Image (tube, rainbow, N blue to C red):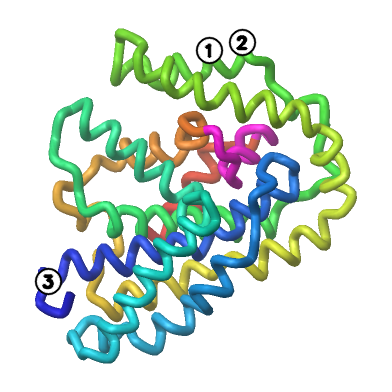
Amino acid sequence: MRDAPPAMMVAGVGDLLAAFASYADWWLAYRLGLDPTYTEFAQTLMGPLDEIFLEHAEGIRTGTLESMSVLAKLIALGGLAMSLSHATAPLSGYEHVISHVLDLIAEQTPRPLTQHGTQVALATLLTTNAYQIFLEEFEPTEVNLANCYPTEAEMKARIEAAFISMDPQGQVAAECWADYKIKLEAWHAHRVDFAEALQDWPAIQAQLRSLVKPPEVAVKILKAISSPLRFSELTPTPAVEDVRFAFRNAPLIRRRLTVGDLFVFLNWDQETLWTQVNKNL
């Protein structure tokens, strides 16, 4: 690993930084009744990633054996955490579906894919920013519960409209809808859980705050390992509009619930949200 190209090392760190928000996404899905598989096992196994990376980032950048050994162990533990949890959820939340949409756009263009882990790291900056905004601005007393449950027809039409430009034949939209439909049905089935969560918001807010790491910490780590800090620094470079599209539409492609889905179900102003999360990136 020490002798591998630096870009691959950076990507390895970046993929693990997904945990800065993915743990929260997994717990959120569990708390709202959509994912009974949640466990703290992955966090216990991997340890405090923010503290570990802050301590070893410089050593990882310069390639010391000690720090590269730590990185190797963390990558192995990440794989074990997902295998033994029987889910990729510990290290795959909103940030990964953003990355998946960017890959989908690249494949349809077509253009080469960028380094997966580095792209995920930059998507994590978006999602940790989004979580901060959500935790600071969400007011459960202002929620109209009836407006949080779109019909299948409404969401299918939304998915078809979102992806028609990249695939006029409709195959992409059909594949996304097959997965999304499962999530939408579960969301409707667990309406009581969401209603209860609104009443218990202070406790939920506190738990999410404990799981989400500040985007500033991720930026500090990425700087220390000489990682790209903006999508414009990736090779090949995705268009700004593609990143915006991926951020807004990522919740539509997978059955797993993340905070991105709450922005959809709560009818959050997506354009304002994008401006907020992207202003420093």
Compared with 133, 265 (above or below) is: above
The answer to whether residue 145 is magenta is no
Q: Amino acid at mark 2?
A: Ala
Q: Residues within 10 Å of mark 3 (few under 14, many from 20)?
A: few
Report helix, strand or loop for mark 3. Answer: loop
Return the residue nearer the eye: 161 or 50: 50
Quarter of the figure that contains the C terminus: bottom left
Q: Amino acid at mark 3?
A: Ala
Image location of residue 6, percent across then percent down: 15, 71
Report helix, strand or loop for mark 2. Answer: helix
Residue plotted at (51% across, 26% down): 179
The residue labelled by disc 3 is: 4
Residue plotted at (52% across, 79% down): 48
Can see residue 23?
A: yes
Q: Horizontally, is 68 left or right of 130 in the view?
A: left
**Residue 157's disc number:** 1
The residue labelled by disc 2 is: 153
Q: Horizontally, is 164 left or right of 160 in the view?
A: left
Q: Residues within 10 Å of mark 2 (few under 14, many from 20)?
A: few
Extent of the magenta region: 255-267
Name which quarter of the figure residue 210 lies in.
bottom right
